[in-house]
Amino acid sequence: MRRPGRTSWVATAALATAALGGCFGDTTTEFPPGLEPLEDDTAPAQQGGSYTETLTMVDGELTNYTWVHGRGYILADPGTVWAASKDVDVMASACSTDTYSAEVGVEPEYEYGFRISYEVDQVITIAWDELWRYGTIEGTPSAPTLAMIRYQKVFGSELIQLIEGSVQLHATDDPDVTEIETIEHLAAAGGGASDIRASMQYRFDSLAAVAHGQPQPPCP
């Protein structure tokens, strides 16, 4: 899919590299098998009263990467949210890239998955691939009580050293509410917590919209 050019951390990195006359190659990164979350999610849960369809995020820096943890609630049943999450357009980083395409079913050992290829064209082209894996951990695919997504950059520009993330969908005490836990790590030229937050918020908003039978919101 091609979208209008965006101002993003990837575009900023591309422009800076071009200005400095830099030349970067591609790297391949191993993605170990499995569907474990990256770590415990430290974003706070909603307390008391009725659930609201909001996402709360916290972030920080470690030596090798920036991290963001998010926790939110979608006012739809887990089966509907899980089905919506399998729409590539819903989960893609559409607002920070110029083009993307996906191949579904590249790892048949998982319930669902795809390889998504991104490009940002700003004087020079930055391209990379991510693998996304899905699995129902508890319950069934049509009525999960716990479902997991893991994704990681597996090939592409050296300007992006690391992109990895996990998304958990939980049933709650309300059958029409789904809890979302989402974590992402990023190490990249020009990338920071604000970029992860923007992508995480848009993905949450898109997932909520599609779960309610609405179109995805426009990029901010």
Image (cartoon, rainbow, N blue to C red):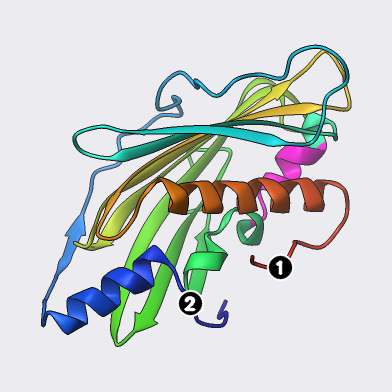
Count neighbours of disc 1 (C-alpha within 10 A) and say few if under 14, some if 14 to 19, many if 20 or more.
few
Q: Nearer the viewer, residue 61 or 119?
A: 61
91 within the magenta span: no
Determine whether the residue tagged by mark 1 lies in a helix, strand or loop: loop
Residue with the mark numbered 2: 98
Count neighbours of disc 2 (C-alpha within 10 A) and say few if under 14, some if 14 to 19, many if 20 or more.
many
Q: As shown in the figure, which amino acid type bears the numbered disc 2?
A: Asp
Q: Is residue 79 left or right of residue 165?
A: right
Instruction: Locate the N terminus by quadrant.
Output: bottom right
Q: CA distance from mark 1 to mark 2?
A: 15 Å
Which quadrant of the figure has residue 142? Answer: top right
Q: Residue furthest bottom?
A: 123
Residue 52 location (% of width, % of height): 82, 30
Residue 138 location (% of width, % of height): 65, 18
Determine whether the residue tagged by mark 2 lies in a helix, strand or loop: loop
Residue 190 location (% of width, % of height): 29, 60
Residue 163 location (% of width, % of height): 35, 48
What residue range appears in magenta? 80-87
Residue drawn at point x = 53 percent, y = 53 percent = 199
Residue drawn at point x = 19 percent, y = 61 percent = 158
- Label at residue 218: 1
**Residue 176 vertical position relative to residue 13 in the rendered view, above or below:** above
Q: As shown in the figure, which amino acid type bears the numbered disc 1?
A: Pro
**Residue 98 vertical position relative to residue 192 in the rendered view, above or below:** below
Q: Is residue 54 left or right of residue 105?
A: right
The numbered mark, 1 or 2, whose residue comes first in the sequence reads: 2
Residue drawn at point x = 18 percent, y = 83 percent = 19
Q: Main secondary structure of the magenta part?
A: helix
